Amino acid sequence: MSLHPTLQPYADAWTHSIEAISELVQPLVEGEWNRRTPCPGWSVRDVVSHLIGLDSEMLGDPRPIHTLPRDLFHVATDHQRYMELQVDVRRHHTAPEMTSELEYMIIRRNRQLRNDNRDPGARVRGPFGSDLTLEESMRRHAFDVWVHEQDLRTALGRPGNLDSPGAHVTRDVLLDELPRVVAEDAHAPRSSAVVVDVHGPVEFLRTVRVDIQGRGTLETAPALGPAASLSLDWETYVRLACGRVTPEAVADRVKTDGDQELAAAILRNFTVTK
């Protein structure tokens, strides 16, 4: 038996990104592991530790028994504390320890994926003991690993893979959140439309229509006379949606038309990651 065809794109995206990450960090000297990434509070070592921890848990390994220090300024919520545990426990690991553990985890996960014959709808355990489908778990994981690959590339000055399989999974995950951002968080007017036009390695144009009840839906057809429109490049879209930059920091890379207050409200609420 082998992985269900529905799940294969997410396995392929994960494999592409995690192998790229392994290649990126393999030659790093000790000091380079301490470079700051765009992920708030995390160094290169921290990001890799996070990824090792996530995949270890997907393998069924127990979470480490570890007490977090009280002075981690970037850790304020239960979600952040949960994620920080796998990171902090590895903060003093050496470069060879990090690369060895990463390589071993990749071998184990590849073996697991090759032998996994579960249905996409099978229920699995997620963070905090949450219950979700195997398909959603793998989709979210492929998204997470690609975003962190980009964090590492930014920190190390090695841009690339902006149109890789993980990038296309990320596009779909982020677009799923766009109606909520526009209709609920930015409070776009009822019976209005907002157009988002993204160019670059991954290109798309989407319309969010807000109905009379204030619910947002995503459409591929462009709207005539939208209340507001935003045009930006793919890398900026990702960095905004994943909380890596503020709207002010990339104001020169985002073009807005129409209702400027609405456009500003959308950009203020653009971050969808926790």
Image (cartoon, grey):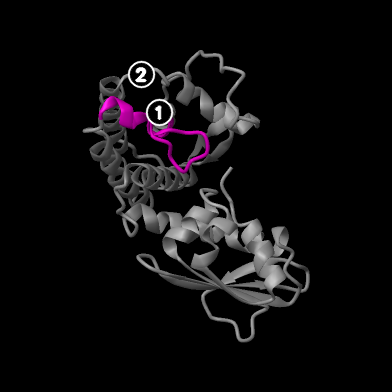
CB-based contact (under 8 Å), mark 2 and mark 1: yes
Residue type, numbered disc 1? Ser
User: Quick check: can you spot residue 170?
Assistant: yes
Residue under label 1, please give it: 49
Q: Position of residue 155 (x, y in %)?
A: 37, 42
Q: Is residue 192 above or below residue 146?
A: below
Q: Residue at x 78, y 69 (%)?
A: 213
Front residue (pair 32, 131):
32
For mark 2, what is the residue? Answer: 93
Tell me the number on the disc at residue 209: none
- Quadrant containing the C terminus in the rendered view: top right
- SS assignment at label 2: loop
Position in image of residue 188 (x %, y %): 72, 68
- The first of marks 2 and 1 along the sequence is 1
Q: Which residues are magenta?
A: 29-50
* Residue 131 painted magenta: no
